[in-house]
Image (cartoon, grey):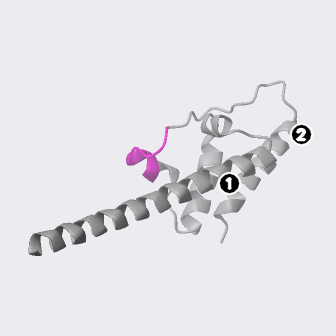
Amino acid sequence: MKDQKEVEEYLASIRQTIAKSENLVAEAELRIAETDRFLESQGLTREQVLNLKLTGEQRRLVDEELKRRGLPGLEEDEARGEMPVYDATPSWGAQDTQGDLDNRKRKFGALMQQFRM
C-alpha cells in the first residue's frame, strides 16, 4: 500500500512540474508574439533588430539607459555570452540624409519604450 501511495505522490509532483513547464512555455510564446507585433508596428522584424549595428555613442547611450533602469548593460550581457557582439560601425551609408538618421533614432527610441518603468 505504501509503495502505491508513494508512486501516486511522485506522479502528482511530476504532473505539477509539467503543468508549470507548459505555463512557462505558453508565457514565452505570448511574449514572442507580443514582441513580433510590436516590431511589426514599427516596420521591423526580429532579424533586422538582431542585425542592428550600433555606433560607440549609441552603445554608450543604451548602456546608460539600461543601467538607469537597473538592468545589466550590453557589455555585461556580452561577457556572459547572452547576446551577439555588435559591430561598432554605422549601418547606414554615406548617401543617407539626416532624415534617415532621425528616423532610425525615432525607431530605436520606440524599441526602448518597452523597457521604461
Residue range highlighted in magenta: 76-84
Choose the circle earlier in sequence order: 2 or 1: 1
Q: Is residue 8 above or below residue 22?
A: below
Name the one closer to the observer, 29 or 88: 29
Judging by the rendered image, the residue that carries numbered circle 1 is: 34
Residue that appears at 69% across and 31% down: 91
Q: Is residue 79 magenta?
A: yes
Q: Nearer the viewer, residue 106 or 8?
A: 8
Q: Is residue 46 left or right of residue 79?
A: right
Q: What is the quadrant of the C terminus in the image? A: bottom right
Looking at the rendered structure, the kind of residue marked 2 is: Gly
Residue under circle 2? 99
* Residue 98 position within the rendered picture, expressed as x and y whole percent measured from the top left: 87, 38
* Image position, residue 22 (x, y; %): 46, 58
Q: Is residue 72 left or right of residue 63?
A: left
Image quarter of the N terminus: bottom left
Q: Looking at the picture, how far across and down is residue 6, in whole percent?
A: 16, 71
The residue at 23%/72% (across/down) is 9
The crowding category of the residue bearing disc 1, from other C-alpha atoms within 10 Å (few below 14, some 14 to 19, many at least 20), is few
Q: Is residue 9 left or right of residue 65?
A: left
Whether residue 33 is in magenta: the answer is no
Left or right position of 99 against 81: right
Where residue 12 appears, x then y in whole percent?
Answer: 30, 69
In the displayed structure, would residue 57 be above or below residue 26?
above
